[in-house]
Every structure is written in C-alpha cells, then in structure tokens.
Amino acid sequence: MIEIFDSAPAVAVDEVEYVRLLGYPRGHVLAERARELADQAGSWYARHGRPWVYARELRDPVVEGDTVRFGHHVLRARRLARLLREAGADRVVLVAVSAGAEIEQAAHEAWRAERPDEYFFLEMYGSAVVEHLTMQIGARLCAWADGERLAVLPHDSPGYPEWDVAEQGHLLDLIGRDELPGTLDVLESGMLRPKKSLLAVFGVTPHVDRVADLRQLVPCEHCAFTPCQFRRAPYRRAVPAEEAPAADTSAAGDAGGAAPPYRTSVRALRRWAAERLAMARRADGSVEAVFRYDGSTCSNMGRSLAFRYTVTLEPRDGRYVIAGQRCEPVEGDEGYQFMCEYIREGDSLVDAIRSESPLAGRPLDEVLTWSRPSLGPACYCEPDARLHKWGLVLETIHFALSADGGQAFRLDDTGETHGS
C-alpha cells in the first residue's frame, strides 16, 4: 500500500497558474512592478517556505448513496461518491498538503506594515504552492498507478461542489493528524489552519477502460504537470503559444496615437470588452452595460466565483454620467460562499458589495483619474479588492465607448451590442 511522507518537497510554481491566481487575464505577461513583486514572493518562499505533503492509501471504500464510509468514518460527499461508483474504484488515496504557516505570517506582517501589494503577491504565491503540491502528488500517484495497472481519478475536497466545507474535520480525522509532516488544524468554520493547505481524496480504480470512456473521470484536464508521461488528455487551461500576448505596458496600446490614460493594458481592455461586456442603448439615449467578472477565492484552493456588474449611463452635456451601478453574484453561482469573509459574515458581505457604488453620479471619464488600489485579490473579501475591480469594469466600459474600443462594437438603437 502506498504512503508518501515528505517534509521538504521541491516547489516550482508554474508562472501561468500564478498569473491566473493573481487575477490577470489569460496569457498576461508580468512586467515592471508586478514582475518585481512576483520575483520577490518567489525568492522569499525559496528561503523561508516550509511545504509538506502526505498521502496514504485506503482500500475498499463503502459507497452508499451520497456517502463514502471507511469503518466508522463517514464522508458525506455526493460527487465523490458518484465518481467512485461510476469508476468502480476499489481504493482511495487520502492527501494532505500545505505551503506552511510561514508564508501566511509573512503576508500578515506585510499587511500590518501597510504594504498591500506585497501582502497580495505573497497570499497568491501561497495558493500557487498548494496547487503545485497537489498537482505534484497527483503526478506521483499516476506514476505509481501506471505500474500497478490502475488509474487515478480527479481529486475531490471539502468545499468543492457537493461536499460541505464543514466536512474538513471528518476528513482530517480519517487521515490522522499525528501522521502528518507538519501541523494542521480545522477551525469551526471548516477552514484549515494554516489556510494555505488542502485535504483531498483521489479515487483509484482497476477499471482503466472506464476512465478512457468517461472523460469526466480523467484527471489530466485539471493537471498542469506538463512533463507527465502518463497524460491522457490536454490540460484545459493550457494557452497555445500563438494566443499568448506579449507584455503591453503602454497606455496607447496598438492605437499608435494619443489614447486615454488607462491604468489597465489596452490589450486587456479590448479583450474584456469583447468577451465579458454587453451593452444596450435605450430609447432615452441612456446605456446599460453589463460586465461579468470571473475570479476565485484566495483559500479553498481558489474556488471559482462570478459576479455581475450593471452600470447605467446617462448622456449629459456631451459626457456619459454614471446614473447607477451595482455588483452582485451571478445567479446560480455559489463560489462566493467560500470566501473567507462570507464564511465569517454571511450575507452581510453580499449586501455590502451590492451597496457599493463608488462613482455613482460622476462622469464615466473620471475613472481615468480616480485614485484607487492598483492591485487586488481575485476575491471580494476586502473593500480595496472590490474598488480595484470596479476600476477594471469602468475602464472597460469607457474603452468600449471610445473611438478605439468602438471599433469592436456597434451599439445600435434597438438594444444590444454587436461585435464587428
């Protein structure tokens, strides 16, 4: 039976994954201050980080309805139960990984010292380390399984869909606290401490043919371990080289002339305007703009979340004035419920997000001179993170209505925007 105990695993964070966790668009290349902060976080972790991983095999899980039982330990995990049942899994591998408490403490110290940019890059680096360790141990399990004529299934964790985060304690009890290379505890909320940690279950099946037939059972689409010789499917988030844009730090972007002084790359604004923004002109000349923001939580392994921004603009004296603005979770998306502040504050956090309208009543072009945070986490826990996102949204709308951005849009009098 396999058991992995590693108190000093090698860490090589994938830059593409780190950039994604930082909240940049796909294919973005870090430059200038962002490059400096990213390198600083990586160098700090190389000197002071204390990662660890642990994995242990358990055989003969009893799958009953929405539960998976091992002796007197019961895991109430609907999706995991369904996955094990469909794959005919006869064993699982329990996994615990952690980036260590040191990076959490360093990020906290940066925040208290009023260095929010350093705090944010350290926080996201810790999340990237956890993703890397999980990917790394998944690759080790695939190598072991291949030699045993077995197949490893995608991992599942408390806090993922159909598995309540409150189940973290049950899973940690099953793994065994005393078996781990480092300290790990579970808070009453279900959050782990250190928070840059993960508990997971990898199913293992002898029915390799079932994995080949059912694409949802193939872990490769969710694994960024590019040199893996056991890959059965391409990584979903991989970006073809020809699609990856070069760094764009100029305000004018590709326009070649005097462009508005956007704080965001024009190339990014053009892409967001095309992919995330919809606009409609009303009979009274007003414009309604709807922007979808896709981000992730800073803990719980970066659970995806989606928010909808609605902005109403009225023409006054030759300028568009923000007559209304509102941000709220996309209907049906529950990712926001895994944010740290939501777990602590509940719906009061969502109420605060909905109530914020930082430039309401002001001309839209004031976003170009608005003093706001230059960086922010991909989540919505902190006010600065929310202001940062409002800046991105309003700049995208301004760009779409500008002479340059208007090349990608025809805003007709009947309602909707149309791509050129």
Image (spheres, rainbow, N blue to C red):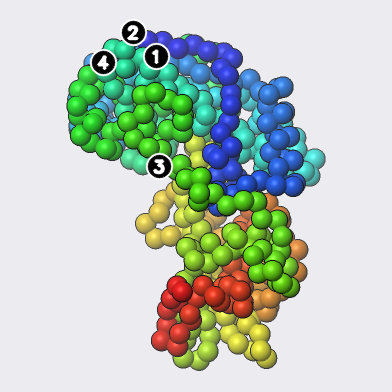
Q: Horizontal placement of 404 versus 200: left or right?
A: right
**Residue found at x 51% / y 72%:** 408
Q: Which amino acid type is marked by label 2? A: Met
Whichever of callouts 2 and 4 sits on the residue coming sooner in the sequence is 2
Q: Position of residue 283 (x, y in %)?
A: 46, 91
Q: Which residue, given by chain and number where applicable, does mark 3 sit on?
A: 236
CA–CA distance in space, label 1 to label 2: 8 Å
Q: Horizontal placement of 379 versus 362: left or right?
A: left
Nearest the eye: 322 or 374: 374
Decide: marks 3, 2 in contact (CB < 8 A)?
Answer: no
Q: Which amino acid type is marked by label 4? A: Arg
Q: Position of residue 116 (x, y in %)?
A: 73, 45
Decide: marks 2, 4 in contact (CB < 8 A)?
Answer: no
Quarter location, residue 231: top left
Q: Position of residue 257 (x, y in %)?
A: 71, 72
Q: Which residue, given by chain and number where applicable, does mark 2 sit on?
A: 1
Task: Sort mark 1 into few (<14), some (14-19) or many (20+) by Cα contacts within 10 Å.
Answer: some
Q: Which amino acid type is marked by label 1? A: Arg
* Mark identifier at residue 149: 4
CA–CA distance in space, label 2 to label 4: 14 Å
Decide: marks 1, 2 in contact (CB < 8 A)?
Answer: yes
Q: Which amino acid type is marked by label 3? A: Arg
Whichever of callouts 3 and 1 sits on the residue coming sooner in the sequence is 1
Q: Horizontal placement of 236 versus 354: left or right?
A: left
Nearest the eye: 166 or 249: 249
Q: Which residue, given by chain and number where applicable, does mark 1 sit on?
A: 56
Q: Regarding mark 1 in the picture, which secondary structure is present there? A: strand
